[in-house]
Amino acid sequence: MRSEALKLLLMVFLARFASRKSSHLAASKRRSIQSRKHSFRTMISWWQEEGTSQTWENLHAISSPHGGDAGSSVPVFVMLPLDTVTIGGSLNKPKAMNASLMALRSAGVEGVMVDAWWGLVEKDGPFKYNWEGYAELVQMVQKHGLKLQVVMSFHQCGGNVGDSCSIPLPPWVLEEMSNNHDLVYTDKSGRRNPEYISLGCDSLPLLSGRTPIQVYSDYMRSFRNRFKDYLGEVITEIQVGLGPCGELRYPAYPESNGTWKFPGIGEFQCYDKYMRASLEASAEAIGKADWGRGGPHDSGQYNQYPEETRFFQRDGTWNTEYGQFFLEWYSGKLLEHGDKILAAAEGIYRGTGAKLSGKVAGIHWHYRTRSHAAELTSGYYNTRHHDGYLPIAQMFSKYGVVFNFTCMEMRDGEQPEHANCSPEGLVRQVKMATRTARTGLAGENALERYDAGAYSQVMTTNRSESGNRLTAFTYLRMNKRLFEGNNWLHLVEFVKSMSEGGRDGKLSECVSCGTGLYIGFIKDKGVQKTREAALV
């Protein structure tokens, strides 16, 4: 434990130095290095003289949150590991978590984000909620003076980008699915996807006498009741799960079992009997019964390109009267689904002081084509002629929900030419949509990135005058690599820069220049002589 504390003291020293360093390396370089060496030795000496518990308290006291102009400051959160709470319902590796939170606090991070998995909390049966592991986390977060974003995760973990563990839906829900296969999304080949309940049965009492919307509402209400004393103070944001990966979308590009690979167009997910019944009714209502007999027959397969299909090609079926009907129905069902859940969430959390957010996927591949095929199969009716994100932003705005968007770290030039990507163009469009709808915009990185270029892109995006600036940014994800050398230093300077509104839009090329500090393994002197901890 003492060795862990010493390592963290070193990390805090780096964090405090990196956040203050910037403008005076010239004439005062030698003097400042000597001063930092003295401070570092003082911290080591101080740790050796104090008891471990006192060390935690004193270290917390010297930590400094981000500063900067409150008007332009963008708070940074860090996502916790997916398995922060164990299958048994307890906090996973609490000592490591405590140490990590202290380090994040020292870096000026505003708080952390955690998934509250439906498959863990209500796994023992309907209405049998176990929040104990999350309660321990909330108290630990509060102790370190951090804030917490909690995701109501009604989807399974496993089978998507970045999923490092498996957390299925509650066993009693899986049993219902085994008895009724149409509870889950289905593609035109009959392939079932168990990661999220089909929105086609949102209002049907198919889950032990409750509708999915009622089940989600009861879950959120249980969370509110259990954590009412922390809402608005420690728990400052509830991100409402709206689909696969928590995102408002269809599971059009499932990676499990190699079904889909980037940059495939994906497939429409409207072939369970409840979705088919809805499509049929919509077609009959406009006197086009033939249009309701299934989804498009010419939309290709998961891993094809737009021009390989008649539906998505340049002047394809997507741009016909039938295509417009189908896409309006398909995207409209997704909007209805989001509206129902967010209406329930707004009523449940009203007056608690916690803000609400919803997540939308950053589907940037084939964005530079006319049809935007990958967005269409995911439920976003976004084409060269139709804005698919403004209706979502307007629906979020109706309930005061922050629009959380991914791929903020990506640049067009980093993407393969054949995929016709434009993450930058997509982000610009979303920024304009949220500004028009007058709803807040928050961001995340889509993939794990530690380089200065990714952080700089986020800052550039934030400072851009085209559309909304960010209300917050959540970094994906806390793990061992984040705390390594330059990775850690990049995060520290990024947090500092965002606290100043993104500054000039780029990190220093050498954030650690002149520190003269190297950190390796540090052993407790009572066990083994310190192997590596040197000022060089």
Image: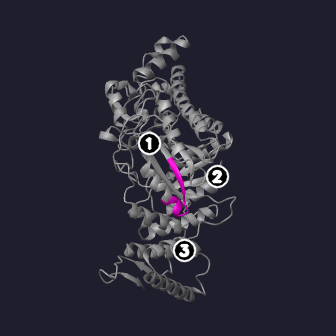
Q: Is residue 144 magenta?
A: yes
Residue 74, percent from left and from top: 61, 58
| Residue under pointer 2 | 469
Q: Secondary structure at mark 2?
A: loop
| Residue under pointer 1 | 245
Residue count near mark 3 (Cα–Cα under 10 Å), binned few <14, some 14–19, many ≥20? some
User: How much space separates mark 2 and mark 1, taking CA atoms?
Assistant: 24 Å
Residue count near mark 1 (Cα–Cα under 10 Å), binned few <14, some 14–19, many ≥20? many
What kind of residue is marked 1? Cys
Residue count near mark 2 (Cα–Cα under 10 Å), binned few <14, some 14–19, many ≥20? many
Residue at 35 percent across and 81 percent down: it is 532
Quadrant of the rendered image containing residue 505:
bottom right
Q: Is residue 254 magenta?
A: no
Which of the labelled discs sits on residue 16, or is there none?
3
Quadrant of the rendered image containing residue 493:
bottom right
The quarter of the picture where the N terminus appears is bottom left
Left/right of residue 259 with respect to residue 279 in the rendered view:
left
Q: Secondary structure at mark 3?
A: helix
User: How much space separates mark 2 and mark 3, taking CA atoms?
Assistant: 27 Å
Residue 79 appears in the rendering: no
Q: Secondary structure at mark 1?
A: helix
Viewer-nearest of discs 2 and 1 = 1
